[in-house]
Image: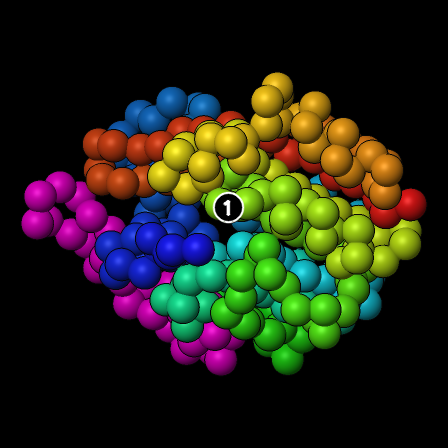
């Protein structure tokens, strides 16, 4: 599995996505459409699909630079964040240690604005561990968890079926699974023969229903700022499941 997520420019983009304030993403001197503002805070909103009761253990697969992992730690005694990008995991671990990360928001051409990423407030960093890993080849020694979260991951894997078949052994009986995917299947990430033949939702239901009960389905919009004038606005299919 090749990794396209190691460039400094993409790290900056993801630090902005996970940790920037609303005004840092959408400066208040512009009349931004309401749908753009409503798409902020994606890493918090997907985690909010879990129940609010405390849990012992959690796994955040494809955690990126760690925004959702930090959020999961508010209700979980122990959380592991795993990503295939060394750059992302190094950044997440730096923030977990309480350090800040300077990064740049691209405006246009060579014009940038300097920003600082910091872990969210009121986080117990001792609950969190970050590791480099491959979502399609997680070791059996990792164990199982009360909560598993995977946002915008499935349609970026070369062999998504390999990952999905692993999920029943990762989630404890009665545990919760939250999957979010924009269903943007692209040959540069996933060979077309590994795409769903129908809708992604129907495909997930067919694969997961023997071991999971679907609790909730909805759309969660998200916004990735590329430049001051170019943004990616997308809708992710968010599904919540309970392990049988």
- Decide if residue 85 is on the left or right side of residue 114: right
- State the quadrant of the C terminus: top right
Question: In this rendering, does residue 56 appear at all?
Answer: yes
Location of residue 236 with respect to 1 vertically, above or below: above
Residue reaching furthest top?
198
Residue reaching furthest front?
193
Place of residue 26 in the rendered image (x, y in percent of width and height, measured from the top left)? 33, 38
Location of residue 84 with respect to 162 vertically, above or below: below
Q: Quadrant of residue 200?
A: top right
> Depth check: 4 or 80 in front?
4
Place of residue 149 in the rendered image (x, y in percent of width and height, measured from the top left)? 66, 51
Q: Residues within 10 Å of mark 1 (few under 14, many from 20)?
A: many
Q: Residue at x 45, y 68 (%)?
A: 89
Q: Quadrant of residue 146?
A: bottom right
Residues shaded magenta: 91-117
- State the quadrant of the N terminus: bottom left
Place of residue 130 in the rendered image (x, y in percent of width and height, measured from the top left)? 55, 71
- Decide if residue 8 is on the left or right side of residue 41: left
Residue 114 is one of the magenta-drawn residues: yes
Q: Residue at x 34, y 70 (%)?
A: 101
Location of residue 199 with respect to 225 vertically, above or below: above
Place of residue 151 in the rendered image (x, y in percent of width and height, measured from the top left)? 57, 45
Location of residue 236 with respect to 2 vertically, above or below: above
Residue 115 is one of the magenta-drawn residues: yes
For disc 1, the marked residue is: 157
Secondary element at tag 1: loop
Q: Residue at x 22, y 32 (%)?
A: 229
Q: Residue at x 78, y 62 (%)?
A: 145
> Depth check: 107 or 168 in front?
168
> Depth check: 84 or 24 in front?
84
Question: In this rendering, does residue 182 appear at all?
Answer: no
């Amino acid at each position: 599995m090749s990794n396209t997520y190691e460039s400094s420019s993409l790290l900056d983009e993801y630090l902005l996505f996970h940790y920037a304030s609303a005004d840092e993403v959408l400066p208040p001197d512009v009349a931004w459409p309401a749908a753009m503002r409503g798409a902020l805070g994606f890493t918090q909103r997907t985690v909010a699909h879990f129940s609010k009761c405390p849990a012992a253990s959690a796994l955040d697969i494809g955690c990126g630079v760690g925004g959702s992992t930090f959020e999961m730690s508010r209700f979980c005694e122990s959380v592991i964040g795993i990503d295939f990008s060394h750059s992302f995991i190094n950044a997440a671990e730096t923030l977990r240690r309480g350090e800040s990360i300077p990064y740049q928001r691209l405006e246009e051409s060579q014009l940038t604005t300097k920003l600082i990423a910091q872990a969210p407030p009121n986080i117990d960093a001792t609950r969190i561990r970050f590791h480099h890993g491959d979502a399609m080849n997680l070791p059996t020694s990792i164990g199982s968890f009360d909560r598993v979260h995977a946002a915008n991951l499935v349609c970026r894997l070369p062999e998504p079926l390999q990952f999905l078949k692993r999920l029943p052994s990762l989630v404890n009986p009665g545990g919760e699974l939250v999957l979010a995917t924009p269903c943007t299947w692209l040959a540069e990430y996933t060979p077309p023969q590994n795409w769903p033949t129908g809708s992604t939702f129907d495909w997930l239901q067919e694969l997961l229903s023997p071991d999971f009960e679907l609790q909730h389905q909805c759309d969660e919009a998200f916004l990735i700022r590329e430049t001051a004038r170019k943004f990616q606005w997308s809708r992710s299919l968010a599904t919540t499941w309970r392990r049988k």
